[in-house]
Image: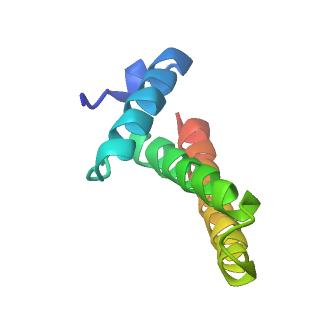
Amino acid sequence: MTLLTPRAFTPVEVARLHADWTEAWHNSPTAPLAGEPWVQVEANHRANFGIWHEEDIARRDDLGSERVRLAKRTIDRLNQERNDAVERLDEWIAAQ
């Protein structure tokens, strides 16, 4: 995966990275990116990725109430991480 410079921060590049990350994370974990604004973009997408999977678990009927409760707690935590990442991204954008 190629790290982009902030000048290439466009919706098309963000969508491309999201697609690449989603495919990669289904196969194996990857090291987080570094550098602004990509660290926030990736943190936001990692939280979304985790939320999607935990929501799938919370909808299942065969795992028992304790696993559903844990999924909902994880969703709450990931939602806060997602919000934090968006706030940091907003700060980076405002500084540009």
At horizontal 30% and vertical 53% (from top left) the residue drawn is: 29
Q: Position of residue 5 (x, y in %)?
A: 32, 27
Q: Is residue 83 visible?
A: no
Viewer-closest of 74 and 69: 69
At horizontal 51% and vertical 24% (from top left) the residue drawn is: 15
Viewer-closest of 19 and 54: 54
Q: Position of residue 61 (x, y in %)?
A: 75, 65
| Residue 19 position (above or below residue 52) | above
Q: Position of residue 9 (x, y in %)?
A: 46, 24
- Left or right of residue 16: residue 2: left
| Residue 60 position (above or below residue 93) | below
- Left or right of residue 12: residue 33: left
At horizontal 55% and vertical 20% (from top left) the residue drawn is: 11
| Residue 12 position (above or below residue 27) | above
Viewer-closest of 63 and 33: 63
Task: Count all numbered tags in the image, as a single digit.
Answer: 0
Quadrant holding the N terminus: top left
Q: Quadrant of residue 94?
A: top right
Q: Is residue 60 visible?
A: yes
Q: How is the image coloured?
A: rainbow
Which residue, as the protein is rendered here, is positioned at the far top?
A: 12
Which residue, as the protein is rendered here, is positioned at the far front?
A: 62
Q: Position of residue 48 (x, y in %)?
A: 59, 49
